[in-house]
Image (cartoon, helix red, strand yellow):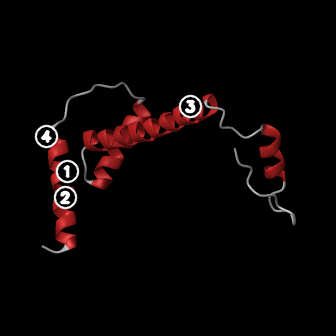
Amino acid sequence: MDSLTTACVIVYTFHYIRAQMTTTLSVRIDSDIKDQLEALAKRARRSKSFLAAEAIAAYVEAEKWQLDEIQAGLQELDTGRAVAHKDVSTWLRSWGKQRERKTPRA
């Protein structure tokens, strides 16, 4: 099996397994958003449920990443690893100038 075929099998298997482990969730959305979702589903030749599930999955992944990064930043602050506001401000104000300063380090 070549690498492209292997990649296709892996992607297909992932989506097949993911589709088997689903559950139902009811949500209330604005009627205009529902109309837009219906139109998009027709154009994409996908179901409204598929598009909504993909959108929710993307949101959850992005939100989880953001909250994880915030938590990691707070933990760094708790250990004393930080850069003073004044140093960051001075660095940012130097952007685009002839004598741009180096990135401040903790």
Residue positioned 42% across, 36% down in the render: 33
- Relative depth, front residue between 20 and 36: 20
The amino acid marked with disc number 1 is: Phe
The amino acid marked with disc number 3 is: Gln
Q: Is residue 88 above or below residue 24?
A: below
Q: Position of 47 compared to 58: left or right?
A: left
Q: Secondary structure at mark 4?
A: helix
**Residue that badge 1 annotates:** 14
**Residue that badge 3 annotates:** 75
**Mark 2 or 3 closer to N-term?**
2
**Residue that badge 2 annotates:** 10
**Mark 4 or 1 closer to N-term?**
1
- Relative depth, front residue between 25 and 79: 79
Q: Residues within 10 Å of mark 1 (few under 14, many from 20)?
A: few
**Mark 3 or 1 closer to N-term?**
1
Q: Would you say the residues marked 3 and 1 are in contact, meaning their CB atoms lie under 8 Å apart?
A: no
**Residue that badge 4 annotates:** 20
Q: Residues within 10 Å of mark 2 (few under 14, many from 20)?
A: few
**Mark 4 or 2 closer to N-term?**
2
The amino acid marked with disc number 4 is: Gln
Judged by depth in the image, the label closer to the viewer, 4 or 2, is 2
Residue positioned 20% across, 50% down in the render: 15
